[in-house]
């Protein structure tokens, strides 16, 4: 009886993880903002600073799992956050990503195109404030959404402090 409960629990956990791992977030026309939910984001945490976007895209030694908390508990780790966005209309609207914790040492946003190429944007306190695309206290990035395809993003955060991953789409 006890063993059956464990098997059922593990099965349910597996189904939940599978269901949320690749969820595409729909951004609707006229929507002013969208605050990211944990269930829509996968995370890979590592101490290996040599892992780059090519390793991530190849799936080499990376194990993404559903985000359990918006708090980064290890300032010495590197966090890779993965999410997909789809603009649910025929009109191209401009969307931005705002990271609400402005204390991260390094933040890199990779936009993956449907053909496998990517576009990199960087920010973080290691860069001069005057070099930011948006002169704002938080880290802000333009989201380069593809037409007709969901767009996959990877957000690499090297925090060097305990903080949060809370962000929103505007």
Image (tube, rainbow, N blue to C red):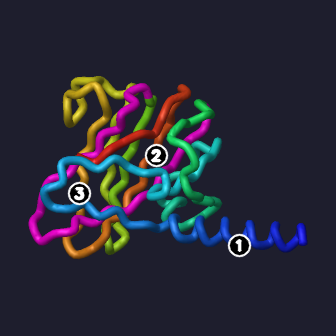
Q: Residue at x 74, y 67 (%)?
A: 10
Residues under numbered marks 3 and 1 in contact, where contact means CB atoms less than 8 Å apart: no
Residue extending farthest front: 1
User: In the image, what residue occupies the spot 19% across and 71% down?
Assistant: 147
Q: Say whether disc 3 or disc 1 marks the residue closer to the N-terminus.
A: 1
Q: Is residue 46 left or right of residue 95?
A: right
Q: Which mark is residue 11?
A: 1
- For disc 3, the marked residue is 144
CB of mark 2 within 8 Å of CB of mark 1?
no
Q: Nearer the viewer, residue 115 or 92?
A: 92
Expressed as whole percent of the image width and height from the top left, the position of residue 73 reads 61, 34
Q: Earlier in the sequence, mark 2 or mark 3?
A: 3
Report if residue 127 lies within the magenta region: no
> For mark 1, does the 10 Å Cα neighbourhood hold few (<14), some (14 to 19), or many (20 or more) residues?
few
Element class at badge 2: strand
Q: Is residue 106 above or below residue 153?
A: above
Percent of width and height locating residue 156: 46, 46
Residue indicated by mark 2: 156
The CA distance from mark 2 to mark 3 is 17 Å
Above or below, 72 against 68 in this view is above
Report the magenta residues as a range: 76-103
Query: Nearest the camera: 116 or 9?
Result: 9
Q: What residue is shown at x 15% (from left), y 53% (from top)?
A: 94
| Residue nearer the viewer, 165 or 28 | 28
Looking at the image, residue 104 sits to the left or right of residue 76; the answer is left
């Amino acid at each position: 009886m006890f063993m059956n409960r464990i098997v059922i629990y593990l099965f349910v956990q597996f189904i939940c993880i599978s269901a949320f791992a690749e969820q595409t977030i729909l951004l609707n026309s006229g929507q002013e903002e969208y605050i990211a939910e944990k269930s829509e984001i996968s995370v890979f945490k590592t101490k290996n600073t040599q892992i780059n976007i090519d390793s991530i895209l190849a799936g080499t030694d990376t194990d993404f799992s559903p985000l359990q908390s918006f708090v980064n508990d290890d300032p010495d780790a590197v966090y890779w956050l993965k999410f997909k966005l789809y603009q649910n209309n025929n009109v191209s609207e401009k969307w931005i990503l705002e990271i609400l914790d402005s204390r991260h040492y390094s933040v890199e946003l990779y936009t993956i195109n449907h053909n496998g190429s990517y576009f990199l944007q960087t920010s973080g306190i290691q860069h001069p404030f005057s070099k930011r695309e948006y002169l704002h206290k938080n880290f802000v990035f333009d989201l380069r959404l593809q037409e007709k395809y969901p767009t996959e993003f990877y957000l690499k955060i090297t925090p060097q402090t305990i903080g949060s991953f809370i962000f929103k789409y505007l």
